[in-house]
Image (tube, helix red, strand yellow):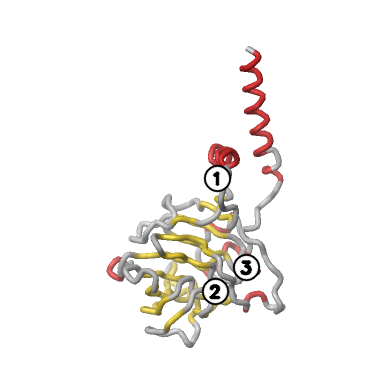
């Protein structure tokens, strides 16, 4: 009887320790923001930071950490491949958070959100950032296409498709971008170093799921991976 009581008290203590202070902590910061030399954080190159992986392909942070508002993932039915997020899900369920606290976690950062309002899954990576922020290539490779992005019948920036050097059998699509004049088919790019363009105000024409966790109405740069050009919508 005494052992049973002690066992119950142990579980209660563990739950209180794991979650007692999480309810009042507010929205967590996705990445640690480091000081930048320039006053214009939107024009600073991102430091290397992997946000998601698929096979041997690693998708890096395409904007400066100081301009990052949140990281989200959601599903899609357009033929894009499922991504494996790196870091910790900030809005994970109770049981998952309890298991993570008991077992320990190898990666606490970056923190990301599973977005609601669409298909389940992690096919699309949304990197929250204000309009006008410089956007850089998330992979090393070359540009294979630049096309208009139409949302709700309105042109909202462009979509830049990249052929990654690490995995040439797939294509990485970066959306919600106003392309830089230097970007054209065949242009070589380096991850977190080559500028693709600037982020557009996509929230002005379509409500963004990331708005539930980020400022600037959830404006974001969206990244997806497709198996081949034939799978493009």
| Mark 2 residue element | strand
| Residue at left offset 63%, top offset 75% | 42
Q: Nearer the viewer, residue 166 or 143?
A: 166
Q: Earlier in the sequence, mark 1 or mark 3?
A: 3
Q: Position of residue 171 (x, y in %)?
A: 36, 70
Looking at the image, is 63 positioned above or below residue 81?
below
From the viewer's perspective, tell me whether residue 2 is left or right of residue 91: right
| Residue at left offset 37%, top offset 59% | 81
| Mark 1 residue element | loop
Looking at the image, is 63 positioned above or below residue 214?
below
Looking at the image, is 104 positioned above or below residue 108?
above
Quadrant placement of the N terminus: top right
Q: Earlier in the sequence, mark 3 or mark 2?
A: 3
Instruction: Answer with the quarter of the image where residue 18 lies.
Output: top right
Q: Position of residue 14 (x, y in %)?
A: 65, 33
- Whether residues under marks 3 and 2 lie with C-beta atoms below 8 angstroms apart, the answer is no
Q: Earlier in the sequence, mark 1 or mark 2?
A: 1
Count of marks placed on residues: 3
Instruction: Answer with the quarter of the image where residue 47 lies.
Output: bottom right
Q: Nearer the viewer, residue 195 or 176?
A: 195
| Mark 3 residue element | helix
> Which is in the foreground here, disc 1 or disc 2?
1
Quadrant placement of the C terminus: bottom left
The numbered disc on residue 65 is 3
- Whether residues under marks 1 and 2 lie with C-beta atoms below 8 angstroms apart, the answer is no
Residue on which disc 2 sits: 199
Residue on which disc 1 sits: 92
- Whether residues under marks 1 and 3 lie with C-beta atoms below 8 angstroms apart, the answer is no
């Amino acid at each position: 009887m005494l052992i049973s009581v002690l066992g119950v008290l142990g579980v209660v203590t563990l739950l209180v320790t794991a979650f007692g202070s999480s309810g009042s902590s507010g929205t967590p910061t996705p990445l640690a923001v480091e000081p930048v030399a320039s006053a214009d954080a939107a024009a600073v190159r991102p430091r290397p930071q992997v946000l998601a992986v698929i096979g041997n392909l690693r998708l890096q942070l395409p904007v400066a950490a100081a301009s990052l508002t949140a990281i989200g993932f959601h599903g899609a039915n357009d033929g894009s491949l499922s991504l494996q997020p790196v870091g910790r899900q900030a809005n994970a369920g109770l049981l998952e958070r309890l298991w993570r606290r008991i077992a320990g976690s190898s990666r606490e950062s970056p923190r990301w959100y599973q977005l609601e309002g669409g298909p389940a899954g992690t096919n699309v990576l949304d990197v929250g950032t204000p309009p006008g922020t410089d956007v850089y290539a998330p992979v090393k490779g070359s540009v294979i296409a630049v096309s208009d992005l139409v949302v709700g019948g309105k042109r909202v920036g462009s979509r830049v498709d990249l052929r990654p050097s690490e995995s040439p059998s797939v294509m990485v699509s970066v959306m919600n971008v106003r392309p830089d004049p230097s970007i054209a088919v065949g242009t070589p790019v380096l991850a977190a170093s080559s500028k693709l363009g600037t982020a557009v105000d996509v929230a002005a024409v379509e409500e963004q799921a990331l708005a539930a966790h980020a400022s600037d109405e959830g404006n974001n740069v969206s990244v997806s991976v497709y198996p081949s050009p034939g799978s493009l919508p």
